[in-house]
Amino acid sequence: MSNYINRLRNLSPKSRISGGKGAGRREDLPLDHQLTFSPEKDERWTFKDERSLCLNDEDVNELVNQNKGNIGLLCGISLGLSEYREFVWAKGGKGNARFNGEVLSVQDKVLGKLNHIYSGMTSGVRFELNGDNFWINDVNVTTLLKLYRLRPSEKARIYLIGLRDKLGLILSSRETSTRFYGAHEKAQELYVEISRATEYLTPDAPLCLPAGRRDS
């Protein structure tokens, strides 16, 4: 991944606004037809063809779509866009409706994706329902359960029980979003299926010898 992506991912709001090697020369930069803004030598924001916001010639919309689960990067892009807009406005571009509209559109998209991430978190558990697939912290529970049924092992059984406990946390949440209601039924279904599938020990489970009888 490019250096500027890594930098945006790790930068805090304070350091981004006040720091940067290019901060002192912003007012000297001309506002060209692409509204070029370069706060760092490896970071260049442009507005191409009066319709596409770009970061180092990469479409910002695409960056957001490709990194929809990366909280740090999404926040970095949002901060970068805010600083970019401040620069353009300071140069007299406050009335550029197309630019302002595109910035607002991307910011709304970033906010929507962040809300999507946070609304899918319950006690540190991030979940997502995609068709028939239910994901917990980037693990496809549906697929894992299918594989377990084909080839059960004690290690997989213990892992599934851990996922079932996480499903229990999700089911106990009081989340009221429509997205949660859509996933609730699937989570409940998987909870029951995992409980049934892991009810019995697998052939490779360690033997548990009964305790010896103690005479009274």
Image (cartoon, rainbow, N blue to C red):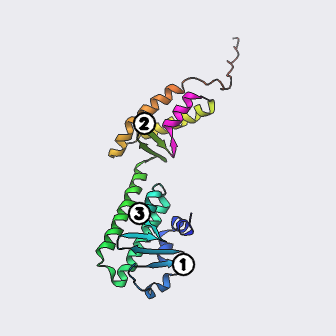
Residue at x-position 37% and y-position 43%: 180
Disc tally is: 3
Q: Position of residue 151 (x, y in %)?
A: 59, 29
- Mark 3 sits on what residue? 61
In which quarter of the view is residue 132 placed? top left
Q: Is residue 196 visible?
A: yes
- Going from the N terminus, do you reach mark 1 or mark 3 first? 1
Residue pushed farthest front?
A: 49
Q: CA distance from mark 1 to mark 3?
A: 22 Å
User: Mark 1 against mark 2, which lies toward the viewer?
Assistant: 1
- Mark 1 sits on what residue? 41
- Mark 2 sits on what residue? 187
Q: Main secondary structure of the magenta part?
A: helix
Check disc 3 and give the amino acid type.
Answer: Asn
- Find numbered disc 1 in the image and state the secondary structure of the residue it sits on: loop
Tell whether position 183 is magenta.
no
- Find numbered disc 3 in the image and state the secondary structure of the residue it sits on: helix
- Going from the N terminus, do you reach mark 3 or mark 2 first? 3
Q: Which residues are magenta?
A: 137-151
Label 3: few (<14), some (14–19) or many (≥20) C-alpha neighbours in 10 Å: some
- Going from the N terminus, do you reach mark 1 or mark 2 first? 1
Quadrant into which the C terminus falls: top right
Q: Nearer the viewer, residue 20 or 130?
A: 130
Check disc 2 and give the amino acid type.
Answer: Ala
